[in-house]
Image (tube, coloured by chain):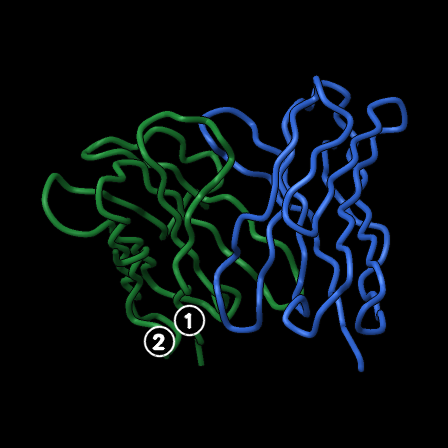
Chain colours: A blue, B green
Amino acid sequence: GESVGLHLPTLSVQEGDNSIINCAYSNSASDYFIWYKQESGKGPQFIIDIRSNMDKRQGQRVTVLLNKTVKHLSLQIAATQPGDSAVYFCAENRETDKLIFGTGTRLQVFP
Amino acid sequence: NAGVMQNPRHLVRRRGQEARLRCSPMKGHSHVYWYRQLPEEGLKFMVYLQKENIIDESGMPKERFSAEFPKEGPSILRIQQVVRGDSAAYFCASSPQGRNTGELFFGEGSRLTVL
């Protein structure tokens, strides 16, 4: 069936390094993706989005890359900080903001 | 500006009881979404509502679950005759009218534990 999933459940990085979180999707018709951050005990928080007419989009310290050929997207966080520790979800937006979330990747930042 | 408000934050029920979860969207938002999250899993879409209308309930279990968003007051997610498998975090999100931006504003969630 259709799915949005992640490669790695946990990613550990040293403070100051760059983090790359990956996400694969199976529906080739998917055209709008969003990354969310969820800190422990809190609700998800929007980070950045990308539509299929783009292959790269940058925000503050974050970059999302979309490769439609292999149905893969990634979230890159520059100069990772302790406050970046959270679970990161990619989500597919299927009309009217109905989001289909992946399983999530836990990012752990150590000093 | 207050964000999305959910209550209760934690709710404990025994099997067979009813659970009512409330969600007040952000001011000016007329679209409400409910999601369920099991431990160490992603969020699963349940239902999408606008004022007095259910737009998409494709993620709602066929029995025991219902949702409403009345003209006045918060949105309510109601679970009747709860079972242990209903134990989860239930998140509400809101958005302004029909922007389709993908940016939903989530509440802090209501954590239901069924004994």
Taking the spot 80% from the left edge, 82% from the top edge, the residue there is: A111
Q: Position of residue B31 (x, y in %)?
A: 31, 36
Q: Residue at x 79, y 37 (%)?
A: A73
Residue at 63%, 27% (x, y): give it.
A32
* Separation of residues labelled 2 and 1 (CA atoms): 5 Å
Drawn side of residue A100 relative to residue B2, left or right: right
In the picture of the structure, the residue carrying the numbered disc 1 is: B112
When the figure is inspected, residue A51 is found, relative to residue B3, above or below; the finding is above
| Residues marked 2 and 1, same chain | yes
Q: Which mark is residue B52?
A: none
Residue B10 at x, y = what percent?
37, 76
Read off the chain for label 1: B
Q: Residue furthest right?
A: A70
Tell which of B62 and A34 is nearer to you.
A34
Which of the numbered marks, if any, corresponds to residue B11? 2
Viewport quadrant of the C terminus of chain B:
bottom left
Mark 2 residue element: strand
Judged from the image, the secondary structure of the residue bearing numbered disc 1 is: strand
Q: Nearer the viewer, residue A64 or A37?
A: A64
Chain bearing mark 2? B
Q: Residues within 10 Å of mark 1 (few under 14, many from 20)?
A: many
Q: Is residue A105 above or below residue B95?
A: below
Left-right relation of A48 to B60:
right
Quadrant in the picture for the N terminus of chain B: bottom left
Q: Quadrant location of residue A65?
A: top right
Q: Are marks 2 and 1 in contact (CB under 8 Å)?
A: yes
Query: Is B94 positioned to the left or the right of A26 in the image?
Result: left
